[in-house]
Image (cartoon, rainbow, N blue to C red):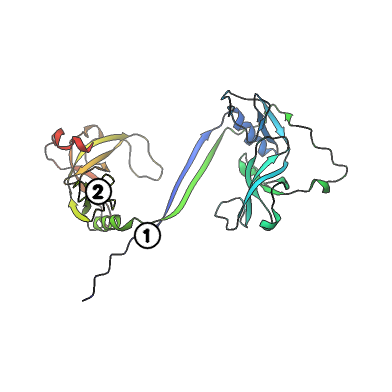
Amino acid sequence: MTAASPPEVLRAPLVVEFPFTRSLGPVQSAFLTGLRESVVLGVKTSDGRVVVPPVEYDPVTSEEIRDLVEVAPTGTVTTWAWNGRPRPNQPLGTPFAWALVKLDGADTALLHALDAPGPDAVRTGMRVRVRWAAERTGAITDIACFEPHDDALDAPDAPAPEAGPAPHDGVFEDPVTGIVAEARLDYTYSPGRAQTAYINALSERRTVGERCPSCHKVYVPPRGACPTCGVATTDRVEVGPAGTVTTFCIVNIKAKNLDIEVPYVYAHIALDGAGLALHGRIGGIPYDQVRMGLRVEPVWTDGGRYPDHYRPTGEPDADYDAYKELI
């Protein structure tokens, strides 16, 4: 007799993206607009230090600072790390070094890419200069990268560098007043044994949790172990399908790429037999009639692998004492 093989644990590639739009204050606006114009600006603190990139508040005293200065596009590597396998959307498509560069005239270092043929060509203390992007829009990417720079090879008639940072009023035509910060994370997710069983059951329109053998709480979705008792939860329990709204919120802001008209209600729902509530959208009822204690049931769409939303069952509301411990 052969033993049954364990079910295959699920794996799936996932992407989390969040394009964050933010406005800029006068210091950051001047810094990014300056990059667009091939100018690097820092800010001078009350004790005379020059911070690049500039900040709006002194990191020591927390006082507001606005004393902008221009620093040189050349500098010195203070430390570095080699990146042999660049990821998508990184500054360079070929291997490069991440480096902290203290620009001439600055007292702090700026993190950016350093283009070099290999790690043997990079060292702490090496001289580098900014390589400007061909097209500049007012973003940190206007610095395409740093590149090695030997001051001794400068033309003999080149002007001597400034003795120190030069004051700058931060005024430019058509200043940059806002940016969109693109945040993205690509990863492969494996839900593990417990949630694999939970997801597979959902595809059959069943909701399955796991019971702790010690405290007997039924976790939905299951976690594989009880966080209170610290023991494995291997006893699977089917719960629901109906449940009770324990608490809820009304959503008034429409999310991008989400085809749901606002306002709508998102709620915590304690399925019958579960030891804690899960969340889901409430439909089939005006948003202003949703209430704590409302009895609801799942609504599935054709081919859906999880409930699209929950709707009222028509039963009387649950008594508060029946769900107060699940709020």
Q: Residues within 10 Å of mark 2 (few under 14, many from 20)?
A: many
Give me the disc on residue 115. Answer: none
User: Relative to 307, is 180 on the left or the right?
Assistant: right
Q: The residue under label 1 is which amino acid type? A: Arg
Q: Residue at x 23, y 56 (%)?
A: 234
Labels 2 and 1: the sequence-earlier one: 1
User: Relative to 311, is 133 on the left or the right?
Assistant: right
Q: Which residue is drawn at 28% across and 55% down?
A: 194
Q: In which quarter of the image is the C terminus?
A: top left
Q: The residue under label 2 is which amino acid type? A: Val
What element does badge 2 sit on?
Answer: loop
Question: 67 or 183: nearer the eye?
Answer: 67
User: Relative to 60, is 13 on the left or the right?
Assistant: left
Q: Name the residue under label 1.
A: 11
Q: Quadrant of the N terminus?
A: bottom left
What element does badge 1 sit on?
Answer: loop
- The correct choice, above or below, for 65 with respect to 51 in the image is above
In the picture, residue 285 is in which quadrant? top left
User: Relative to 268, is 189 on the left or the right?
Assistant: right
Residue 157 in picture, x, y percent from top left: 88, 42
In the picture, residue 151 is in which quadrant? top right
Q: How crowded is mark 1: few (under 14 residues within 10 Å), some or many (20 or more)?
A: few
Residue 227 in picture, x, y percent from top left: 29, 46
C-alpha distance separating marks 2 and 1:
20 Å
Task: Check whether the beta carbons of the residues at disc 2 and disc 1 lie within 8 A of each other.
Answer: no
- The correct choice, above or below, for 164 with respect to 186 in the image is above
Residue 317 in picture, x, y percent from top left: 14, 36
Q: Mark 2 points at which residue?
A: 220
